[in-house]
Image (cartoon, rainbow, N blue to C red):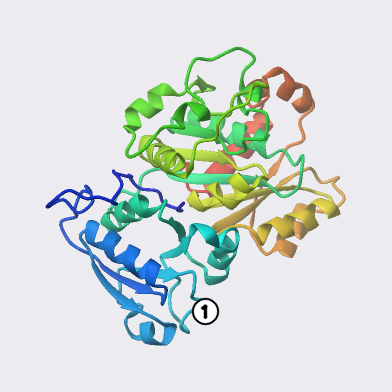
């Protein structure tokens, strides 16, 4: 997946004559540099860049690539590369293979890669990303929220931020990023709301019309949401291609997308790479702060800011936690009586109208550049 998802088209395995993969071709081709000695990644990159209408230069080592590194529009680095040239910008995309496993994301963090593409699954996305790399309209902003420890209240904060943004006229989507979280919708409403959930998109491929996607989702509190079902019935998880299409439609259909990442591998290990920035939420306790430091090491190299749930009476002060973690503090989530019951009864939106909650949410959104 990628930090900035773009429209996915038909597979490029069997392009029609005169149609390199069925992709929209840009008016101006882009210069792409691939740094990899892996024959498979070289061949895949050659086909994908050709389908995107770009030009590819391949270097088999960092030393060979150093001269043209900063002059390339897009730098692709293969998973066989373990270091970067000195004083060069971070690679645009880290390319890997399905067999690379979780180590691919750890390598991306180490190299500072902006995005990750697992081939062949992400071939269509990568072609579209290359065609749109110079686009002046990147779509909506995607902000992820992750709890630094269990029970920190990331889902509550995500709901309140979505509610506050919607109340200020921002077109907002809240995404439930944790298939094991029990269904975010249960905290948003106590009544069945018509609309599609994650499993309904399991067959999605290619480009989803953003207006149709927006209208298909349930709404509450002035915002739309995409939730895992709040039922005990087994559900089928959409595959990687479907998730790419969904996240792309979300970015093109909304001004702000808030992703409640949870703490599962799917949320933190995958969806966090789709986000432009992240909010790490912890509590004012020592164990929570330590746990937050550990999960911070697993997050992608994007702008990360800190939220702390607590008050001046907390054992560890928010400013001290921020200093210890080395990330800026942007807000303190107020302690609100009745949050537990409100979550169980689907009434968190009622608590989100409190003055202290509104003040917190609006301040965070303003600092994050959502509200002006």
Split into 4 quadrants, where in the image is the C terminus? Answer: top left
Element under label 1?
loop
Residue topped by disc 1? 83
- Look at 23% across and 51% down and name the residue there: 21
Q: x, y (%) of residue 260?
A: 60, 39
Q: Is residue 216 left or right of residue 365?
A: left
Using the image, determine if residue 37 lies above or below residue 178. below
Q: Quick check: 352 left or right of 366?
A: right
Image coords of residue 88 (percent x, y): 43, 79
* Dot 1 alpha-carbon crowd within 10 angstroms: few under 14, some 14 to 19, many 20 or more: few
* Closer-to-camera residue (365/226): 226
Nearest the viewer among 289 and 149 is: 149
Q: Is residue 181 found left or right of 116 in the rendered image?
A: right
Residue 240 x/y as whole percent:
47, 44
In the picture, residue 206 is in which quadrant?
A: top left
Point out residue 285 in the picture as x, y percentages from the top left corner.
84, 50
Residue at (48, 49) in percent of width and height? 274
**Residue occupying image coordinates x 53% and y 15%:** 193
């Amino acid at each position: 997946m990628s930090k900035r998802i773009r429209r996915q088209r038909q597979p490029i395995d069997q392009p029609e004559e005169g149609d390199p993969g069925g992709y929209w071709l840009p008016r101006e081709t882009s210069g792409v540099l691939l740094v990899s000695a892996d024959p498979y990644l070289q061949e895949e990159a050659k086909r994908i860049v050709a389908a995107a209408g770009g030009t590819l230069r391949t270097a088999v080592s960092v030393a060979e690539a150093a001269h043209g590194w900063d002059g390339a529009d897009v730098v692709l680095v293969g998973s066989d590369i373990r270091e970067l040239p000195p004083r060069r910008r971070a690679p645009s995309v880290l390319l890997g293979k399905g067999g690379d496993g979780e180590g691919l994301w750890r390598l991306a963090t180490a190299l500072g890669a902006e995005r990750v593409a697992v081939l062949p699954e992400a071939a269509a996305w990568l072609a579209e990303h290359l065609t749109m790399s110079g686009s002046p309209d990147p779509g909506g902003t995607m902000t992820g929220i992750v709890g630094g420890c269990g029970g920190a209240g990331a889902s509550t904060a995500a709901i309140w931020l979505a509610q506050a943004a919607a109340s200020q006229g921002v077109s907002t989507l809240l995404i439930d990023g944790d298939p094991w979280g029990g269904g975010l919708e249960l905290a948003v409403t106590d009544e069945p709301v018509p609309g599609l959930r994650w499993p309904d998109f399991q067959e999605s491929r290619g480009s989803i019309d953003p207006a149709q996607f927006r209208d298909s989702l349930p709404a509450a509190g002035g915002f739309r949401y995409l939730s895992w079902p709040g039922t005990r019935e087994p559900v089928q998880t959409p595959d990687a291609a479907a998730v790419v299409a969904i996240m792309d439609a979300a970015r093109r259909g909304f001004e702000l997308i808030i992703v409640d990442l949870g703490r599962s591998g799917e949320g933190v290990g995958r969806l966090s790479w789709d986000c432009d920035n992240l909010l790490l939420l912890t509590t004012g306790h020592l164990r929570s702060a330590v746990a937050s430091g550990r999960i911070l090491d697993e997050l992608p190299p994007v702008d990360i800011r800190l939220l702390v749930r607590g008050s001046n009476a907390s054992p560890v002060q928010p400013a001290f936690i921020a200093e210890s973690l080395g990330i800026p503090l942007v807000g303190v989530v107020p302690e609100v009586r009745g949050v537990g019951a409100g979550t169980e009864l689907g009434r968190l939106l009622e608590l989100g109208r409190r003055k202290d909650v509104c003040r917190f949410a609006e301040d965070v959104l303003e600092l994050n550049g959502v509200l002006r």
